[in-house]
Image (spheres, rainbow, N blue to C red):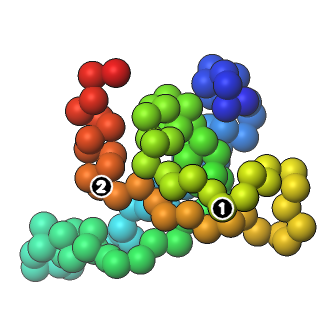
Amino acid sequence: MVKDVNAFCLHPWGRESFLKTITCMKPPKFVPLKCEDPTGKLVELLEQETLMLKGSPLALQLLAYQTAPNLLSTIPIPFDSHSIMDLVVPHLPLYPVPSINDILSVEADPD
């Protein structure tokens, strides 16, 4: 699916996963009529330091790396060459995520 973005978008869980993931990224709803400063409240809610993702963020990451392959250059080379199929523990190895500067430099790259 990562090799074919159209197949990813046509796959039954693709859109549902995307919607679930994006929905959980929005700040909680509030009642504007009962809030004295709705804009300030929205800014406060958007400044949250943590975020719990639901859905399939890994699929979205893979889609991002497929559509912007230069992002791969921001990931350090792993210490070993094991693939996901070789894992003996039930979790993926941790790698640092691309920083905002990495993303902006890839975005500005003409290639």
- Classify 10 Å Cα crowding around label 1: few (below 14), some (14-19), many (20 and above): few
Residue at x 41%, y 55% (from the top left corner): 98
Distance Cα–Cα, label 1 vs label 2: 24 Å
- Secondary element type, mark 2: helix
Q: Nearer the viewer, residue 7 or 103?
A: 103
Q: Relative to residue 43, is residue 4 drawn left or right?
A: right
Amino acid at dot 2: Ile
Q: Relative to residue 27, is residue 108 drawn left or right?
A: left
- Give whichever of discs 1 and 2 has the lower sequence position: 1
Residue at x 26%, y 53% (from the top left corner): 101
Marks 1 and 2: CB-CB under 8 Å?
Answer: no
Q: Quadrant of the C terminus?
A: top left
Q: Relative to residue 71, is residue 17 drawn left or right?
A: right
Q: Which residue is mark 1?
A: 79
Q: Nearer the viewer, residue 41 or 60?
A: 60
Counting labels gives 2
Residue 40, relative to residue 77: is it above or below? below
Q: Quadrant of the N terminus?
A: top right
Residue at x 46%, y 42% (from the top left corner): 73
Q: Which residue is mark 2?
A: 100
Residue 6 visible somewhere in the drawing? yes
Residue 42, relative to residue 49: is it above or below? above
Q: Quadrant of residue 107?
A: top left
Q: Quadrant of residue 71?
A: top left
Q: Position of residue 25 (x, y in %)?
A: 44, 61
Amino acid at dot 1: Phe
- Secondary element type, mark 1: loop
Residue 108, relative to residue 87: is it above or below? above
Q: Position of residue 50 (x, y in %)?
A: 41, 77
